[in-house]
Structure formats: structure tokens, C-alpha cells
Image (cartoon, rainbow, N blue to C red):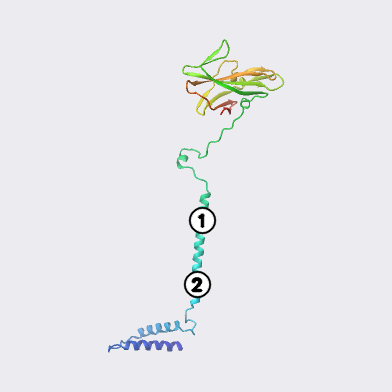
């Protein structure tokens, strides 16, 4: 009832304002227009009516709602930052990928494994007898005996390895390397690689056969041919011994 009276007052006020022109004729409204003005006026008045539940808007509740929205937005932003940080940490923890060129060429990004070296005795598969490298020499010919000499081919020179065999037992022992049929390849300074010559020398290591008394030594050789002048000095030598289908690496120098 009170609401209707307020609406009617607002309507009367609107009509009076309209009528206060400078002699202009009062505008006559239709019933529909009057209903619109009454409804709007009633809403405007009730909005600021403190005694009405639909009256003054609750500013405190509005501020609380805005604060909650801000807090939710801040929490969402923090979560996004944490997710981005975790993602970056996971990317950094991943191992580096190989370059495309290395993958295309079938290359391994890792460095090649260092060869596993063994003793010459083990490479030859000797029991009770040891084999040890003594020295090398570069010569044009090797004098095996007064009646036999090995000469280098034209344009080559001989690289002779001197190797001692020793019976470490307290009894006479057979040493039969020929039956093992080993082959030898020598790598010099990590660059030059040559295979041993097969000779008829009685002291050729690859074809050696003999009986060694307890503690006795036998001097043997391995002969390689290298291009003359290709080896001026030797800093490292590695001997590859293949016996029974198994290859072993022996470090002689370096």
C-alpha cells in the first residue's frame, strides 16, 4: 500500500515538472506510457527504501563478492605460474638430444669406449709361459742367421718387434704357438696400421714351436713392412692379436 503511494507521488512529481513549461501545452500520455513511468518510479523509490528487503543494496556483500572474485583470479594465476615453472624444470631435466646431423649420419653422440687392453701372454693364450715386448727397430733387412736374411720390398722398410718368451714353471714346457694360428696387426701412432709378414724364421713368434726348460727364455720377432719414411718416430704402438676367432688389444708403447 505504501509502495503504491510512493509511486503515485513520483508520478505526480513527473507530471508537475512536465507542466512547468513556458506556456507549452501539457503532453498527454497514453495508459501504457503512464504504466511504464509508474513502474520505473516505484522501482527507483524502493531501491533506496531502507525498510524494505529489496531496498538499499548491500554494499558490504558486494565488496565481499568482489574480493572473493579477486582472490579466485589470483589463485588461478599462481597455479598457472607453478605449472609453467614445473614444465620448464622438466624440460631442463631431459637429456640433450643428438643433433639432427648426427642422427642422419648414424653417429653416436657419446665418445667411443676406450679399448680394453690385455697382456700379450693372455692374448696368445699361453699357460706357464709369458710373452713380453722388448723393443722395436726400423731396418731395410733383418738378419735372422748367417744363412738367412729377410729384406724389405721395394719402397718399404721393416719394422721388427722383439718379443721374449719365458718358461715360468719349474719344469720343461712345450710352447706351441703355431697350432693356435694367430694373426697380428700393428697400429703405429694411432694412424699407420699394418699386418705382420708370415716368414719361415724359426724365431717367428706367430709360428714358434719349441721346448723351454724351467726359467729358459726364447727370443722371437714379428716383422712388419711399412712405407719408407712413413714412420720417423714412434710414440705409441698397439698390437691386435687374433687367435681362435677372438681379437685382443695389447698396448706396447704409449
Q: Compare marks 2 and 1 and give the one earlier in the sequence.
A: 2
Residue furthest out toward the top: 147
- Can you say whether 13 is above or below 175 in the image? below
| In-image side of 107 versus 222 (left or right) | left
Screen quadrant of the C terminus: top right
Between residue 86 and residue 246, name the one nearer to us: 86
Between residue 218 and residue 107, name the one nearer to us: 218
Describe the element under mark 1 as helix, strand or loop: helix
Characterize the local packing of mark 2: few (<14), some (14-19) or many (20 or more) Cα atoms within 10 angstroms: few
Residue 81 x/y as whole percent: 50, 59
The residue tagged 2 is: 65
Q: For marks 2 and 1, give the CA distance.
A: 31 Å
Residue 138 x/y as whole percent: 52, 20
Q: How many marks?
A: 2
| In-image side of 125 versus 236 (left or right) | right
Q: Quadrant of residue 10?
A: bottom left
- Can you say whether 22 is above or below 170 in the image? below
The residue tagged 1 is: 85
Residue at 62%, 21% in the rendered image: 164
Residue 60 x/y as whole percent: 50, 76
Residue at 66%, 21% in the rendered image: 166
Characterize the local packing of mark 1: few (<14), some (14-19) or many (20 or more) Cα atoms within 10 angstroms: few
Amino acid at each position: 500500500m505504501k509502495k503504491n503511494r510512493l509511486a503515485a507521488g513520483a508520478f505526480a512529481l513527473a507530471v508537475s515538472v512536465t507542466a512547468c513549461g513556458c506556456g507549452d501545452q501539457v503532453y498527454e500520455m497514453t495508459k501504457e506510457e503512464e504504466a511504464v513511468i509508474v513502474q520505473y518510479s516505484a522501482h527507483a523509490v524502493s531501491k533506496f527504501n531502507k525498510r524494505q528487503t529489496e531496498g538499499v543494496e548491500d554494499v558490504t556483500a558486494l565488496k565481499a563478492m568482489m574480493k572473493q572474485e579477486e582472490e579466485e583470479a589470483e589463485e588461478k594465476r599462481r597455479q598457472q605460474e607453478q605449472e609453467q615453472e614445473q614444465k620448464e624444470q622438466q624440460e631442463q631435466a631431459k637429456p640433450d638430444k643428438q643433433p639432427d646431423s648426427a642422427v642422419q649420419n648414424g653417429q653416436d653422440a657419446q665418445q667411443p669406449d676406450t679399448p680394453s687392453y690385455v697382456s700379450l701372454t693372455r692374448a696368445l693364450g699361453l699357460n706357464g709361459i709369458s710373452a713380453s715386448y722388448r723393443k722395436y727397430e726400423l731396418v731395410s733387412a733383418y738378419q735372422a742367421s748367417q744363412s738367412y736374411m729377410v729384406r724389405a720390398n721395394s719402397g718399404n722398410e721393416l719394422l721388427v718387434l722383439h718379443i721374449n718368451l719365458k718358461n715360468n714353471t719349474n719344469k720343461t714346457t712345450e710352447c706351441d704357438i703355431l697350432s693356435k694360428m694367430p694373426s697380428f696387426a700393428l697400429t703405429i701412432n694411432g694412424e699407420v696400421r699394418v699386418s705382420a709378414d708370415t716368414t719361415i724364421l724359426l724365431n717367428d713368434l706367430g709360428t714358434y714351436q719349441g721346448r723351454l726348460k724351467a726359467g729358459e727364455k726364447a727370443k722371437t720377432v714379428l716383422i712388419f713392412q711399412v712405407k719408407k719414411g712413413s714412420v720417423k718416430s714412434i710414440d705409441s704402438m698397439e698390437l691386435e692379436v687374433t687367435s681362435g676367432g677372438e681379437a685382443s688389444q695389447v698396448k706396447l708403447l704409449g
